[in-house]
C-alpha cells in the first residue's frame, strides 16, 4: 500500500474527527474495504489515530470555550465505562457479526442525520 493511499484518507478522517463527524468511522471503513485490514485491527488503528486528533481538537474547543463541562463530564465517565464493556464484549463477538453491527450502526446514523434538520437549522442561525 502506497503512502499517498494512506495519507489522504488519514487527513480526511482527521478533518472529520475534529469536526465531530466521526472520522474514525471513515478510517475504519477505508481500512477494511480498501486495504483489506481486519475489522478488529482497523478499530485498534482507529483508536490510536484518535488520540492525537482528539487532543488537538479538544485544545482548540477549550480555547474557544465551546465545551459544556456540565454535559461533557458525565458523558466522558459513561464513555470510559462503555469502552471497557465494549472491549470485553467485542472479544466474544464473531468478526463477521462485528462488521455487520458496525455497518448497521453506520447506516442508522446516516439515516438519522439525513432526516434530523432541527439542530442544523439552529446552528446555522447562530
Image (spheres, rainbow, N blue to C red):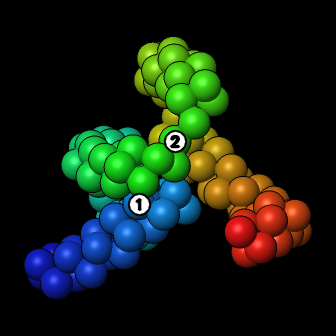
Q: Residue at x 82, y 71 (%)?
A: 121
Quadrant placement of the C terminus? bottom right
List x then y, in percent, for residue 4: 16, 84
Quadrant placement of the N terminus? bottom left
List x then y, in percent, for residue 119: 80, 61
Q: Is residue 100 visible?
A: no
Numbered circles on residues, count: 2
Q: Which residue bears the numbered disc 2?
A: 67
Whether residue 9 is situated above or below residue 94 in the rendered picture: below
Q: Which residue bears the numbered disc 1?
A: 18
List x then y, in percent, for residue 117: 85, 69
The image quadrant of residue 82 is top right
| Residue 30 horizontal side relative to residue 76, left or right | left
**Residue 106 numbered tag:** none
List x then y, in percent, for residue 15: 38, 70
Mark 1 or mark 2, which is nearer the start of the sequence?
1
Q: Residue at x 60, y 42 (%)?
A: 97
Amino acid at each position: 500500500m502506497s503512502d499517498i493511499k494512506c495519507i489522504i484518507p488519514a487527513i480526511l478522517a482527521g478533518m472529520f474527527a475534529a469536526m465531530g463527524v466521526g472520522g474514525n468511522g471513515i478510517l475504519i471503513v477505508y481500512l477494511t474495504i480498501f486495504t483489506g485490514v481486519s475489522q478488529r485491527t482497523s478499530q485498534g488503528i482507529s483508536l490510536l489515530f484518535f488520540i492525537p486528533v482528539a487532543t488537538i481538537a479538544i485544545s482548540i474547543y477549550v480555547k474557544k470555550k465551546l465545551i459544556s463541562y456540565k454535559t461533557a463530564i458525565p458523558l466522558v465517565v459513561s464513555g470510559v465505562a462503555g469502552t471497557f464493556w465494549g472491549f470485553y464484549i467485542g472479544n466474544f463477538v464473531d468478526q463477521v457479526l462485528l462488521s455487520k453491527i458496525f455497518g448497521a450502526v453506520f447506516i442508522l446514523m446516516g439515516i438519522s442525520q439525513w432526516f434530523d434538520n432541527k439542530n442544523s437549522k439552529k446552528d446555522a442561525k447562530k
